[in-house]
Image (cartoon, rainbow, N blue to C red):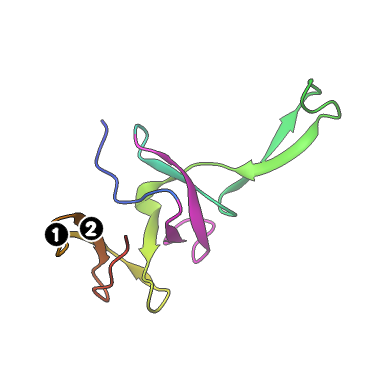
């Protein structure tokens, strides 16, 4: 089931549960079909790769794995703490996101 995701690419998020709890990173990829996001520097995995044309050496490659969207929260622009996201209509009639913690506009 595909749900409406409140997170977008380049959002700053904090991990609220799991092995990387407390880490802050930037969303690099959003996977709405699986309700997951890829966050830079979070949920690192070691991938054993065999030699190929792109990587003739092969070996162990470390990269980020997707993390469930419910395990991250948007970072409030004012105080760098976790916040929920709300939607409202801006003065020029555009739908915008805002941080519920401080009321600050996100985009």
User: In the rendered view of the protein, which quadrant contains the N terminus?
Assistant: top left
Residue 11 quadrant: bottom left
Question: Residue placed at 79% from the left, 28% from the top?
Answer: 55
Front residue (pair 1, 95):
95
Helix, strand or loop at mark 1: strand
Residue that numbered label 1 is attached to: 89
Magenta residues, start to end = 10-32
Residue 75 vs residue 99: left or right? right
Disc 1 crowd rating (10 Å Cα; few below 14, some 14-19, many 20+) is few
Residue 28 vs residue 71: left or right? right
Q: CA distance from mark 2 to mark 1?
A: 6 Å
Residue 75 visible in the picture: yes
Q: Give whichever of discs 2 and 1 has the lower sequence position.
A: 1
Q: Which mark is residue 105?
A: none
Front residue (pair 83, 96):
96
Percent coordinates x, y for residue 82 in the rendering = 37, 68
Helix, strand or loop at mark 2: strand
Percent coordinates x, y for residue 75 in the rendering = 39, 66
* Contact, mark 2 vs mark 1 (Cβ under 8 Å): yes
Percent coordinates x, y for residue 40 in the rendering = 56, 52
Q: Which mark is residue 96?
A: 2
């Amino acid at each position: 089931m595909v749900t409406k995701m409140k997170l977008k690419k380049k959002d700053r998020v904090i991990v609220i549960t799991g092995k990387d709890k407390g880490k802050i990173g930037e969303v690099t990829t959003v996977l709405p079909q699986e309700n997951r996001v890829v966050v830079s520097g979070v949920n690192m995995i070691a991938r054993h790769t065999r030699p190929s044309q792109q990587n003739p050496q092969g070996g162990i490659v470390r990269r980020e794995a997707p993390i469930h969207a419910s395990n991250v929260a948007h970072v409030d622009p004012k105080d760098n703490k976790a916040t929920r996201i709300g939607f409202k209509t801006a003065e020029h009639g555009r739908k915008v996101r805002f941080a519920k913690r401080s009321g600050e506009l996100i985009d």
